[in-house]
Image (cartoon, grey):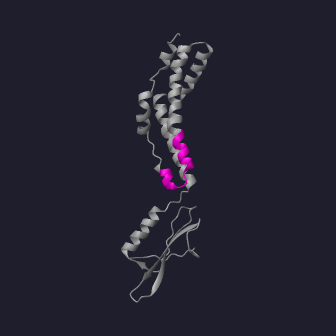
Amino acid sequence: MADYSYSFGEFPAEETAEAKVLRRRVTDDEDISTELSLVVVDPDAEEVVYSFASELSQAEQDALDALVAAYEFETLDEMKTERIMALDLITKDYMHDHYPAFDLDFWNGLLTDAVGGGLANRANYIGAILSWAMNISQGYFDPKKTTIAAASSKAEVEAVTFSYDDCASTFDSSDPDASIAAALAIPD
């Protein structure tokens, strides 16, 4: 049995922005009721503080440890930001594995030159790559980002799934598989 007797000033009676408290009535052999508390505090330091006045059974300790393990200091907004950043990274990694970032910038320049020079076939060839990249953004990234941003709970944020493989299975078949050399070889 573990005996915890840390002190942390006054303990709040319920969950607040600063602390989470589990209160539970327990009865000892002499039918004397005792209140047992678990206090999780200090989200700024991301520390967990226990406060108990009596020994706990192993089952009680396991239940309280599970509560502590489940407690997250991350706010909903922080979680949303992290998930959107992860989604952005996966989406960009997928696109850049097919067409590196420098190449996408170069493609934009080639398209401008082709349109300006009246090279319609070259412009159409290059436009297919940029359309493919735009479809990934509009058909994959944007809807998932919007759903994450609109979520009102952590469970809703976690329910939005995404992965590199998911992106690949959705967009590999529409990749125009173009090359700069082939684009430049189109005289129109």
Residue 185 point in image, percent of width and height: 49, 12
Query: Of 86 and 148, which appears nearest the observer?
Result: 148
Q: How many labels does the image show?
A: 0
Picture coordinates of residue 162 (x, y %)?
A: 45, 43
Please give the name of the residue rendered at 53% of the width and 15% of the height, measured from the top-left corner. Answer: 122
Residue at the (46%, 34%) spot, across then down = 94
Residue 75's image quarter? bottom right
Query: 28 or 181, which lies in front?
Result: 28
Measured from the top left, where is residue 141 in percent x and y?
A: 52, 39
Q: Classify 162 as above or below 72.
A: above
Q: What stretch is highlighted in magenta?
A: 142-158
Quarter of the rendering containing residue 62: bottom left
172 left or right of 51 in image: left
* Vertical arrangement, residue 7 with respect to residue 67, above or below: below
Q: Residue furthest right?
A: 116
Question: Would residue 122 be found to the left or right of residue 171 on screen?
Answer: right
On whether residue 48 falls in the magenta region, the answer is: no
Along the line of sight, which residue is nearer the eye, 154 or 19? 154
Per the picture, the main secondary structure of the magenta-coloured stretch is helix
